[in-house]
Amino acid sequence: MRRPIGLLVSKFWVNEFWEKGFNIVPGVKCPSGFNKKDHKPSVRAIQYCSRYLQEEFQASCPERILALEKTHINWASLALDLKVPSKVMDFRQKIWWAQLCGNLVPLAGTFFAGNKCHQGFSNIVKDIKWMLGQFPKPL
């Protein structure tokens, strides 16, 4: 992460991210456990809990939102009442504008580096750099 954001993330990354103006937010504010394992929440849970994500966006007043992976951009678009395509290649490096805190805030999506981090990882770094060049617009 040092190259795209100029920050080496250490074990104290939460404080460092916060000081640099970053906020990492899980897409869904509801438990996703099933049989004591983490699972993707149901569509109904995502819809029901999207208001909590919307409230977190309102409270944090982000300058930009970059969602990792199609599920997360779908959750963010639901919370922000935006129509965003569901496939990574259809939403990657494209911007949707959300009304937050008196601004139009850019929302974009990229790949997820999770279990298949070798697939698309270099594009995640490029997308972070690209997104850092996007800025909110006053309403």
Image (spheres, rainbow, N blue to C red):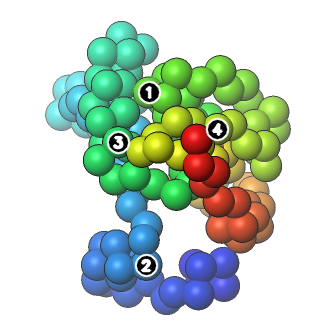
> Measuring 40% from the left and 38% from the top, which residue is drawn there?
27
Q: Earlier in the sequence, mark 4 or mark 1?
A: 1
In the rendered structure, which amino acid carries the disc numbered 2? Lys
Where 40 sits versus 4, above or below? above
- SS of the residue at dot 3? helix
Q: Name the residue under label 3.
A: 58
In the rendered structure, which amino acid carries the disc numbered 4? Trp
Q: Position of residue 36 (x, y in %)?
A: 18, 34
Which of the 4 image quarters holds residue 9? bottom left
In the rendered structure, which amino acid carries the disc numbered 1? Ala
- SS of the residue at dot 2? loop
In the rendered structure, which amino acid carries the disc numbered 3? Gln
Q: Mark 4 points at which residue?
A: 97
Determine the residue located farthest toward the front in the rendered image: 139
Say few, some or many: other residues with alpha carbon within 10 Å of mark 4 (under 14 / 14 to 19 / 20 or more): some
Q: Position of residue 43 (x, y in %)?
A: 42, 14
Q: Name the residue under label 1.
A: 79
The Cα atoms of the two marked residues, 3 and 4, are separated by 14 Å
Depth check, mark 4 against mark 2: the one in front is 4
Which of the 4 image quarters holds residue 44? top left
Which of the 4 image quarters holds residue 134? bottom right
Q: Where is residue 35 in the image (x, y as percent from the top left)?
A: 20, 27
Q: Mark 2 points at which residue?
A: 20
Where 100 sits versus 65, above or below? above
Residue 105 visible within the image: no
> Measuring 81% from the left and 38% from the top, which residue is drawn there?
89
Q: Position of residue 116 (x, y in %)?
A: 63, 53
Are the two marked residues, 4 and 1, in contact with CB atoms closer than 8 angstroms?
A: no
